[in-house]
Image (cartoon, rainbow, N blue to C red):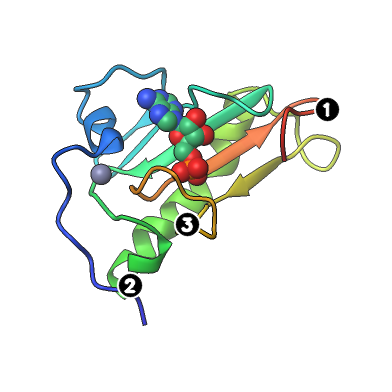
Amino acid sequence: MSQPASPAPDNCIFCKIAAGKIPSRKVYEDEDIFAFHDINPWAPVHFLMIPKAHIASMAQVGQEHEALLGRMMALAPRLALAEGCRPYPEGGFRIVTNTGAEGGQEVHHLHVHVMGGPRPWLKG
Ligand code: AMP
Ligand code: ZN
């Protein structure tokens, strides 16, 4: 069971980025999904994919989000290649979604980290 969704807080930085109210280096945008470069990259390629709608974390995901999350996962490899990750299997990328305090989540708007490029990386 997912935890109940809460309304978007007024101060959600990723809601503001998705709405263009805070500048970001955009990677991709459609009606439901926004992707932008992480401001503090751990890897040569490091961008974040977010739903435009506010979902606090993976803990709030329910059946109604299956299509959205499926689209995000299917889009990630395309964007990774477009952003400079080398093709699988020599290249590839890492997908990470931190959830909750013990999961290392700092920004409480669901986001998928997509990281890649030649190693070593700063982290991960
Ligand atoms: P997490 O720890 O999974 O919640 O990751 C939050 C990520 O958001 C970190 O990697 C930050 O560097 C990144 N971040 C925070 N603020 C911004 C911003 N304004 N633009 C781009 N990335 C950001
Ligand atoms: Zn938000």
> Mark 2: which secondary structure?
loop
Cα separation, mark 2 vs mark 3, equals 20 Å
Name of the residue lying farthest toward the bottom: 1
Task: Write down which quadrant ligand 2 falls in.
Answer: top left
- The tag earlier along the polypeptide, 2 or 3, is 2
Which quadrant is home to the C terminus?
Answer: top right
- The tag earlier along the polypeptide, 3 or 1, is 3
Q: Name the residue under label 2.
A: 62
> Mark 1: which secondary structure?
loop
Up the image or down, 108 lies above or below 26; here it is below
Residue located 24% across and 38% down the image: 15
Q: Measuring from the top left, give residue 84's x and y in whole percent.
A: 66, 22
Mark 2 is on which residue type? Gly
Q: Can residue 105 be seen in this view?
A: yes
Mark 1 is on which residue type? Pro
Q: Mark 3 points at which residue?
A: 101
Q: Measuring from the top left, give residue 99's x and y in whole percent.
A: 47, 58
Which label number is shown at residue 68? none
The answer to whether the residue labelled 2 contacts the one labelled 1, judged by CB atoms less than 8 Å apart, is no
- The tag earlier along the polypeptide, 2 or 1, is 2
Residue located 28% across and 28% down the image: 17
> Mark 3: which secondary structure?
loop
Name of the residue lying farthest toward the front: 101
Which label number is shown at residue 120? 1
Up the image or down, 92 lies above or below 8; here it is above
